[in-house]
């Protein structure tokens, strides 16, 4: 576990792929538990999917948890992800605006739902092409569950290694990494961006 920033109010770390962000129903081991082992005051602010790696922030006081939580709720946090996807998009960039909701019979799967889904928007840009795959940056404008995975699958370019949405055998892991996270840091009150280069 790599620590990018540590202060009395918050800690920013890099979550490895394959580790839960917070405890699961039958899996107590998670990033939160490991941090709490060293600092019992640590508090959850947001999550990444278990198979997604990348930058996460945890609060260290109740006030900083509220301060950071409000930024996530009001979409004042800037996030950039890197992904490798199946196929080559026919454009260099695009914007996906598809509402998402739970696929109840197949939980935890999510789906495009034009009737009961919540608004979900993602910007994407191709940064490299190799064979029949593309490397893209993904910028979520909303924060729905599995948003990036569902959106890329919906436009015909599922993320490599995604066992739920269509490209499971194409990579040894889910090729999705939260590369940057920027927000107003509690305490100093300054806007800062934290970066963890993609491991793939």
Image (tube, rainbow, N blue to C red):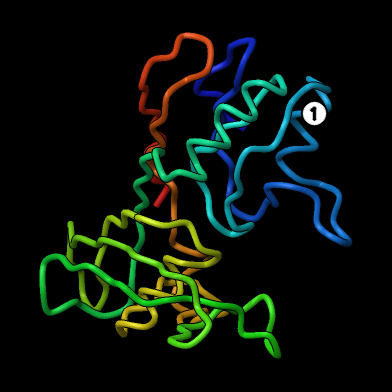
**Crowdedness of circle 1 by 10 Å Cα count: few (<14), some, many (20+)?**
some
The x and y percentages for residue 60 are 69, 21
Residue 142 placement: quadrant: bottom left
Relative placement, left or right, of 5 versus 89 is right
At a point 27% along the width and 55% down the height, the residue shown is: 137
Residue 147 left/right relative to 132 = right
Which residue reaches farthest left? 91
Q: Quadrant of the N terminus?
A: top right
Q: Could you say which is closer to the camera, residue 88 or residue 115?
A: 115
Identity of the residue drawn at 58% across and 36% down: 69
Q: Which image quadrant for residue 132?
A: bottom left
Residue carrying label 1: 36
Q: Is residue 186 above or below residue 122?
A: above
Element type where label 1 sits in the image:
helix
- Residue sitting at 32 percent across and 78 percent down? 86
Percent across and percent down for residue 145 are 55, 65
Instruction: Classify 132 as above or below 15.
Output: below
Toward the viewer: 22 or 103? 103
Residue closest to the eye, 62 or 10: 62
All told, the count of numbered labels is 1
**Quick check: 133 above or below 188?**
below
x and y percent of residue 196 in the render? 41, 35
The spot of residue 184 in percent (x, y) is: 42, 24
Q: Residue at 52% of width from left, 79% of height from top?
A: 168
């Amino acid at each position: 576990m790599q620590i990018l920033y540590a202060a009395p109010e918050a800690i920013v770390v890099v979550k490895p792929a394959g580790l839960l962000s917070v405890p699961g129903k039958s899996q107590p081991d998670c990033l939160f538990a490991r941090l709490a082992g060293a600092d019992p005051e640590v508090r959850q602010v947001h999550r990444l999917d278990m198979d997604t790696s990348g930058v996460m922030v945890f609060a260290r006081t109740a006030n900083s948890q509220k301060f950071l939580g409000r930024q996530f709720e009001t979409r004042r946090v800037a996030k950039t992800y890197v992904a490798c996807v199946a196929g080559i998009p026919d454009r260099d960039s695009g914007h996906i605006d598809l509402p998402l909701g739970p696929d109840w019979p197949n939980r935890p799967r999510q789906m495009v739902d034009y009737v009961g889904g919540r608004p979900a928007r993602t910007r994407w840009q191709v940064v490299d092409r190799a064979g029949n795959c593309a490397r893209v940056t993904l910028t979520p404008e909303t924060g729905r569950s599995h948003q990036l995975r569902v959106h890329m699958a919906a436009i015909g370019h599922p993320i490599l290694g995604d066992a739920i949405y269509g490209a499971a055998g194409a990579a040894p892991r889910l090729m999705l990494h939260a590369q940057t996270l920027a927000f107003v840091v509690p305490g100093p009150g300054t806007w800062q961006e934290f970066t963890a280069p993609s491991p793939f």
